Image: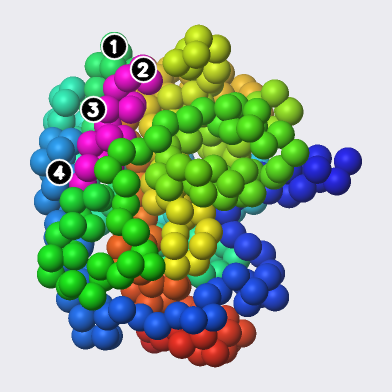
Amino acid sequence: MQATQDKRKDLAGPGIGDYRELEKILPTDYHSLLSPKETQRALYASKAYIEEHLCKELNLMMVQVPLIVEAESGVNDMLDRDGSRTPIQFHISNDRDKHPVEAQVVQAATKWKRMALKQFGLVAGEGICTDMRAVRKDYFLDHDHSAYVDQWDWERAIRAEDRNLDYLKDTVRRIWKVLTGAERHLHKMFPALKDPRYPPLPEEIHFIHAEEILDMFPDLPRKQRETRLVQKYPAVFIIGIGWPLKDGFPHEMRAADYDDWITEVRSPKGVTTHGLNGDILVWNPVTKRRHELMSGGVRVNAETLRQQLTMSGQLDFLKFPYHQGILNGDIPLSIGGGIGQSRTQMLLLHKAHLGEVSVTVWPKILKEICAKRDIVVLE
């Protein structure tokens, strides 16, 4: 009974949820390997490298991306399908309220990117990358979650025959090649980062389905399963996030209208599973915890959009222009994802807290905990 309750509480998303727990897990012997000045130089060096090489590997071009969208467009990202994380919405009283706009701050550019593929006239094999900024007001603010979100949100047009696991895995391997290359690039520029306490990222990423992880650790809730997994495989891509597993719970809740988590696929062992999406997770040797870098996958087509919205009880979403565009075939089939910028930089620079690589708001209690641990949070 307790295991079931723990699993249910674990579905809504990542995070710790308690500052007493956070105080226990933050390192007690931490000291930044780079000075504040060197850190800023390293941040922009990593950003430039990743953007350039991500675009080369996936044939993407950098484009502008919105910070705010119209509420009625349905293009904002709800993150989960349980309605637990909602966007900031506000009224723009344009022209003395004669022509007002109801607007929302984006939580991610997931849906907008797919529509942008058509807007920019891109065809299969071409894509976009954005320097995306967002606000997620419903996160618990800990060492690797903040209300301010920065991502390399990318999207690539594909053919119908590309909607398979092999294509997904090839794309993930290309992304992983960029991230390991960025690490080597930073080590050349900043030799202090080559610290024996922090081994380099593995050259290969391990693929595993969420159902297989459940088989390995059937009694553990998701975050604990992930932690045990990355202790064994320091870099993994977990496939099939959103589909209910054999214990009745999805590995994690996932929105029903972008990633395809319902399509049947066959594992290398010949087992029928579901999902053409997943997350990149690594072992973080500084925090000694699981560390998520990317979420994404093959996007829904007209058939799987209907199926997933039926499962989630959200068929009313089909009225929105984005959803109509998928149903009518007006926007391209695609694969896409969001790579956390600060998350990735925190890992590559061996930082203990997101606040060391990005400037945002943190509660007083968290800043006090960090100060005790020699963690300098930017303000």
Q: Secondary structure at mark 4?
A: helix
Q: Marks 3 and 2: in contact by CB < 8 Å?
A: no
Q: CA distance from mark 1 to mark 3?
A: 12 Å
In depth, the one of 130 and 204 nearer the eye is 204
Three-letter residue code for mark 1: Glu
Q: Marks 1 and 2: in contact by CB < 8 Å?
A: yes
Q: Is tag 4's residue or tag 3's residue first in the polypeptide sequence?
A: 4
Which one is closest to the eye, mark 2 or mark 3? 2
Three-letter residue code for mark 4: Cys
Q: Which mark is residue 338?
A: none
First to last magenta residue range: 164-178
Q: Marks 3 and 4: in contact by CB < 8 Å?
A: no
In the image, is 177 to the left or to the right of 230? left
The residue shown at (42%, 31%) is 207
Q: Is residue 120 above or below residue 182?
A: above
State yes or no: residue 175 in magenta.
yes
Q: Quadrant of residue 326?
A: top left
Q: Is residue 2 visible?
A: yes
Residue on which the image places disc 1:
161
Q: Which mark is residue 55?
A: 4
Query: Taken as a whole, is the magenta stretch helix, strand or loop?
Result: helix
Q: Marks 4 and 2: in contact by CB < 8 Å?
A: no
Q: Quadrant of the N terminus?
A: top right
Residue on which the image places disc 2:
164
Q: CA distance from mark 4 to mark 1?
A: 23 Å
Q: Quadrant of the C terminus?
A: bottom left
